[in-house]
Structures are given as structure tokens and as C-alpha cells.
Amino acid sequence: MTWAILFSLLGSVGAMTGAALLLAFPDQVRIRLLPCLLAYATGTLLGAAFLGMIPLSLEQAPSQAVSATVLAGIFAFFVLEKLVLWRHCHEDGCEIHGHGGGALILVGDAFHNFVDGVVIAAAFLTSVPLGIATSLAVIAHEIPQELGDFAILLHSGLGKSRAFTYNLLSSITTLPGVLIGWFWLDDVGQAIPYVLAVSAASFIYIAVADLVPSLHRRTGAKAGVKQAALILAGIGTIALFRFGH
């Protein structure tokens, strides 16, 4: 449990700090760095889902049940995104949040981070290496998300200090997610493989429905090769934590 709490705090505070640092960079530098972060995050999310969560779910539950849970999870996250609860913003021109939705961003971010906490708890209850790999994937995709949220909050009229404070409050909902997830899953151990399957679905959905389309906005062979290399680096990082112990 100590590991889960530590990495949940590292994820929320680390992502916020990373986003704040990136926000301080000149626009030209930030524009060049963001696609690299998105590509690396795509690799970590897919690696955590396919190398960690799904295989371990299959060890503990029937394959058909796990597959159905992953499929149902992907559909559920599609519906949540349509309800603007799951939306990830990576730019200040987001067509959904662009309609003055600063409060909406904070609510959606708090909800998403709470779910991330449950995901981290389920991973650490399964194994420490899986917990670390999952936390790393969470951190990697939270940094560009928080950066986008910062930009939109600033455009909605908030000052930098207030935007940081509000974003931090929405980020630390990861901690209650870890605590609730830990004690609930500890009592209902048979639910862990299905929580892992839903967690894998969320990672897959974020990667293919949100991050990959963002990557495709940059065309050209050079950009494609760089993105592919960073995706592989993200997958390799997860594989290292998952199998390198």
C-alpha cells in the first residue's frame, strides 16, 4: 500500500510539475516537445495494457470474460468521452473545452485521476513491478494532458498560480482513488482481474482514440520515424519494469 500511495502522489505531483515546467518553456520549444511526449506516452499506455494488465488478467480469469470486459470497457470510455467526462486536452483549441469549459476540465480531470488511482491500486495489489510500470504509464500521459489543461485554464482568464492550484486539487484525487481501490479490491480479490481488464481498456482507448490522432497531425517521414521510435521506447520502458526484475 505504501508503494501505491507513493506512486500515486508521484504521478499527480510529478505530472503537474512537469506540465508547469513545460508551460514555462518558449512556445516554439514546447510545440516541438509535445509530440515527443505524446508518442512516448502512447508506447507506455499500450505497453502497460498489452504486456502487463491483460496477461495478468488472463492468468486469474477466463479468457472470454477478460476479452469481453476489455471490449465493454472501450465502449464505456467512448460513451464517457461523449459525455465529456473523459476528454483529454493537449491544446488550447480543443473544440469541446473551447466553449469556456474551465470548470468542466477540472471536473473531468478529477474524475479521470480518481480512476487512475484505482488502476494503480489494482496494479500494485497484483505485483510491485506491474504497479511501477502502470504508474509510469499514468505519469507519461498525464504530463501532456495537464499541459493542455493549463493552457485552457489560462485562456479562460485564470492567473498562473490559481490555474496551478486548481489543477493540483483535481490531480490529487488520485490518492483517494488509490485508498478506496486498495481496500475495496483487497476485500473483493476476485474483482482484480476485471479491474485490470477495464484499466487496460482505458489505456488502449486513450492511446488509440486520443493520442494517436494527435500524432497523425504531424506528417512526413522524419516525424513518423521519430514517433515510431518514441512509441517503441515507451513500450520498451514498460517491458523493462515488467520483465527486468
Image (cartoon, rainbow, N blue to C red):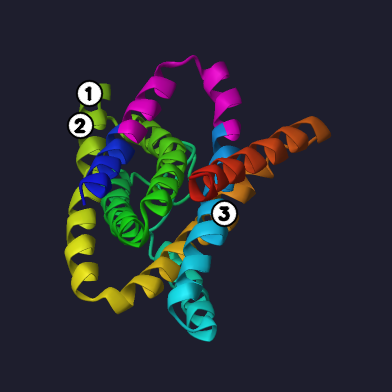
Among all residues in the image, which is located at the extreme top? 26
Q: Nearer the viewer, residue 65 or 32?
A: 65
User: Could you tell me how many numbered marks the image carries?
Assistant: 3
Q: What residue is rendered at 50% in x and 70% in y?
A: 74
Mark linked to residue 46:
3
Task: Name the mark nearer the viewer: 3 or 2.
Answer: 3
| Residue on which disc 2 sits | 165
Q: Horizontal and vertical percent for residue 219?
A: 76, 38
Q: Horizontal and vertical percent for residue 221?
A: 82, 35
Q: Is residue 18 magenta?
A: yes
Q: Is residue 38 above or below residue 174?
A: above
| Residue on which disc 1 sits | 161
Which residue type carries mark 3? Leu
Q: Is residue 171 visible?
A: no
- In the rendered structure, which segment of residues is drawn in magenta? 14-36
Which residue type carries mark 2? Thr
Q: CA distance from mark 2 to mark 1?
A: 6 Å
